[in-house]
Image (spheres, rainbow, N blue to C red):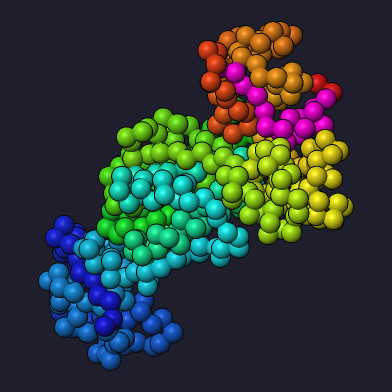
Amino acid sequence: MAPTLKASEVGLKQIQQARKERGWTIDCEKWLLAASHLMAPDREWQIGGPYADGCSEATWRRFLRGEKVGTAAFKAFCQVLGCDWRIVVEREDLLGLQMDPGLVGVPDVMVGCDRASELAILNQWVLQDNCRLIAILGMGGMGKTTLAIHLANQLEDKFDRVIWRSLQQSPSIIDQLDQLLNLWDGEVLPEMETVDAKISRLIEYLHLQRCLIVFDGLEVLMTANELAGRYRESYQEYGKLFRKIGSLNHRSCAIITSTEKSREIAVLEGKNSPVRCLHVAGLSTKAAQEILRDRGLVEEPAWDELIQRYRGNPLALRIISATIAEIFNNRASEFLRHNTIFLGGITEVLDQQFERLSDVEIKLLYQLAISGEPLDIEGLREGLAAAALSTSQLMAALQSLAWRSLIEKNSSTSQVTFTLQPVVMKYVINNFGHI
């Protein structure tokens, strides 16, 4: 059955007013002629008919009475009247315009996801706690995108639609909203609406239809050479979008993956809040061992030390496994005997993250790297005496690095101390030894 639309009660009043202002009588065939030109502009239409398929006097009168008519005719009649069909339409009817439910743009699963506990937490947050906004955060290479892909596939039958939006090409907020709204509207007129209006319309659709939207790679929209959490100047309205998704009532859920926490998420998140953050750390020993086994490494007794050295980072383990296979004939102990942290292709991942850091963050990381042991705030202040940082500045830099998942915090002792993962420590010493 072809999709149909009708005007809402409020919309019908706007239609009636617009018809009166136009000045044509109800039975004037100019309405049908103008609508036919919009529905089939390649045809020559004349007063007296015939008119475009789905465009007739009976259809026109049903439209004016607020009854259902074909989608094409509804949109054409609205345009002839000078009304925005998306504003006057009965909102529930929009659900009849949806494409078949399913996964929209979700990438294929290329690797396994040995994160049963994380998936269980995310499933509870989405399905039981009805969270509206969730950030999956973690250092580069930890598998945030892979985790989100597996979650999207798991939840496909729980939502009317699952939508994947990659941010890697830094789409403008207008393009992002237009492409999302296009899934409902079938057409978008960007010049007619403000960003606020587009966001409000998206939230309304997310209330009408239960959707899961994944925004992958938020960090590319953030500023470089500043503390974490701030959007680049032309992308600040993304913060408004996520703030509205997190704070306004609707039936859907948005997932963000990022190496960096944004400020609106930091403000809204909470244990009992509909906005939550999942920090993705290294894989469990068992899951990490499966990567090494799959890569053909031998000498399993040496694997635990290798996994600890790379903190269970799945990308790092895949890279170092390939190196061990090629140079040491798959023998992990031979590699470990050299007592080194080999970075290889991990450097490229860290390059992308470190090029975003502020000067004070780099100095703080270097101090942690050369200390060789965990430091508390007083220890860091002593090491950075030449930088003349206030306690507030030091705390802000530590918070920023925590938002970027680049420092490790140890609170098992009476004092909280900070340190670096071995991979980060090696990278910092290699690249910032001159400061």
Q: In which quarter of the image is the C terminus?
A: top right
**Residue 431 lies in the magenta-colored region:** yes
Which residue appears at 67% of the width and 49% of the height?
Answer: 315
Q: Is residue 90 left or right of residue 243?
A: left
Name the chief secondary structure element in magenta.
helix
Please tell me which residue lies in front, 429 or 107: 429
Q: In this view, does 230 lie to the left or right of 182?
A: right
Give the answer, above or below, for where 33 lies relative to 77. Answer: below
Give the answer, above or below, for where 434 lies relative to 156. Answer: above
Give the answer, above or below, for where 214 lies relative to 222. Answer: below
Please tell me which residue lies in front, 341 or 231: 341
Q: Examine the rendering and report whether any part of residue 176 can be seen.
A: no
Please tell me which residue lies in front, 409 or 214: 409
Task: Point out residue 256 in the picture as x, y percentages from the top left corner.
Answer: 48, 46
Tag count in the figure?
A: 0
Q: Give the extent of the magenta segment.
A: 416-433
Please tell me which residue lies in front, 367 or 54: 367
Which residue appears at 57% of the width and 23% of the height?
Answer: 410
Task: Point out residue 311 in the picture as x, y percentages from the top left corner.
Answer: 65, 38
Q: Examine the rendering and report whether any part of residue 97 can be seen.
A: yes
Q: In which quarter of the image is the N terminus?
A: bottom left
Q: Is residue 299 left or right of residue 284?
A: right
Which residue appears at 64% of the width and 50% of the height?
Answer: 289
Give the answer, above or below, for where 71 lies relative to 234. Answer: below
